[in-house]
Amino acid sequence: MKRINKTPQSVAQESISSKMLMEFGMANADFVPIMMSAHKDVAPLTALLAARGRTTKGINYTSNFIDSDGAPTGRYRTVGSNCIEYRIEKEDIPICHFKANAAGEVYIDDMNDSSNIGKGKNGFWVFTDSNIAGYKDKIQLADGETQLLILNDPEPSSNNTWKNYVKIVSSELSDVVNESLLQEGMEFQLHSTLHEQDFSETGNERYNFGTKGRTYLTLQRIKYSYSGTAYAMDKNKKVSGYFMEHAGVQSFISEADYQMVRYASQFNENALLEGKQTVSQDLNKCILQDERGRDLLAGNGIMYSGDGPFKFPITSKGFTATWFNSFMSDIDQYVNPDSDGVREVALICGTRLRMSFNQFLADKNVNVKVQNMQWKNGEKQGIIDTYSYYEFAGIRVILLESNHFANKAGIQLNDGSRTNEWMGYVVPLGNTKSGQVGVTLCQLRPSVKGTVAGIDKGGNIASSVDGTHTHMLWQNGVISLNQVCQIYRPWNSSMITSIN
């Protein structure tokens, strides 16, 4: 074991733990096990990301932002046995928002009413969530037209807001600001500066240092076991079943092993997609414990990273041209190219949403095309109308064949469908605007699988019990910097089919 601390240290009367190894040594892991990505039908996103190399590389328990040669090019560092910290590069000109102060005020115009805000080039106050725009800076509002000039150094105000004194930038005294643009949460962006022609006094300083995010790794484990008698019966082929091995030999124990790994793949995919963090954002402290007071630490999956998904409702008509065009327009700004310049999103669908997507694409073919036909011995055998991806306006939508939603709990609706059948996740696969990989699988310890042999095995045993059990344990996480989306079918109580 390589020592972090050069001074010899010792520990007595204490079992080896992850905390001890963090303090006294290191271990290497950093791989996504092949068995997790082998079951593509239940773990399609894991398989896709692993195949594309979207995994951390070279991370161990001593990784730091500073590389071994002193160059500050490292992306990750470990801050605990189950926590990885990563860099988030800031955009040069971020999008900011109007925000209400403690009194609920987003703007104050003492000279005009709400239908004439800023009229006559009179100044008024606005409250924002950022002070990146300052004295003599112009900001552009969400309509892409209205511009305001800030005429004070932004003042800290209540409810974590900044108070700005502004005037409308235009050539007409009668111009006003639409009140809708000044509502809570409405966006604006630093546009440019505007100073007096002679003897201007100063300019604003801005430095983008970026920030850091943390992902917490979730530990999972699973097992199967069998008695010595069951093993003997299975070995002697005294039982029959549906799991077929080589030369038609059937084995329930091999089937149990296969199913354990399959469950593990599905559990891992669920955690990477829908895991919820048990660490408080402000204190970085685990707030979920078991009945013995031990921390149950888990990290966020892709769908709960950042501010969570943008949600898009869909009707029982499914994908229509109007809906799809609107959806693609909405997500366009959040889908960036990958390192090869390709803009892609992965689409994981419930059954009815997947069927609707295929039908939507099939309907685009007025006549069946030659490449859709399947031929055998010169005779037409059938028509293939299955689509794995569709590229629209420069964005490729990759449909992942998955049973992720098929067996999930859902609500039975009175039209015969279930809410889970209409659910869909949309995950952009490209880089961030600053060039970082948008979605990365990460791991600090290797997944392990081992057998605890009982007396039924004979020889060197780990247990006196007449039985054996096999365990599997893994600890994975995901770093997601891209904005994800969710498609869902809205419902209310009147749409639910009675279960009586």
Image: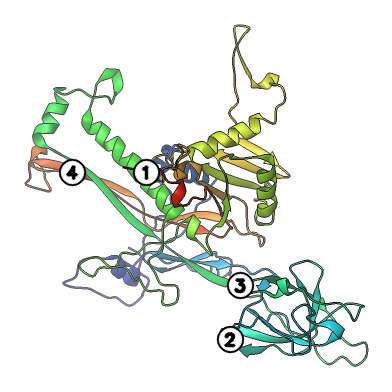
Indicate the colouring scheme: rainbow
Q: Nearer the viewer, residue 413 or 37?
A: 413
- Of callouts 2 and 3, which one flags the residue occurring earlier in the amino acid sequence? 2
- Of callouts 2 and 1, which one flags the residue occurring earlier in the amino acid sequence? 2
For residue 81, which quarter of the picture? bottom left
Q: Residues within 10 Å of mark 1 (few under 14, many from 20)?
A: few
Q: Nearer the viewer, residue 457 or 212?
A: 212
Mark 1 element type: loop
Mark 3 element type: loop
Residue at point 69%, 44% (across, down):
322
Could you tell me how far apart the alpha carbons at marks 2 and 4 are, in whole angstroms? 62 Å
Mark 2 vs mark 1: in front:
1
Q: Which residue is mark 4?
A: 469
Q: Which residue is mark 2?
A: 103
Callout 3, which amino acid? Answer: Gly
For residue 41, which quarter of the picture? top left
Q: Is residue 482 left or right of residue 196?
A: left
Callout 2, which amino acid? Answer: Ala
Q: Is residue 492 left or right of residue 482?
A: left
Q: Nearer the viewer, residue 205 or 498?
A: 498
Q: Quadrant of the N terminus?
A: bottom left
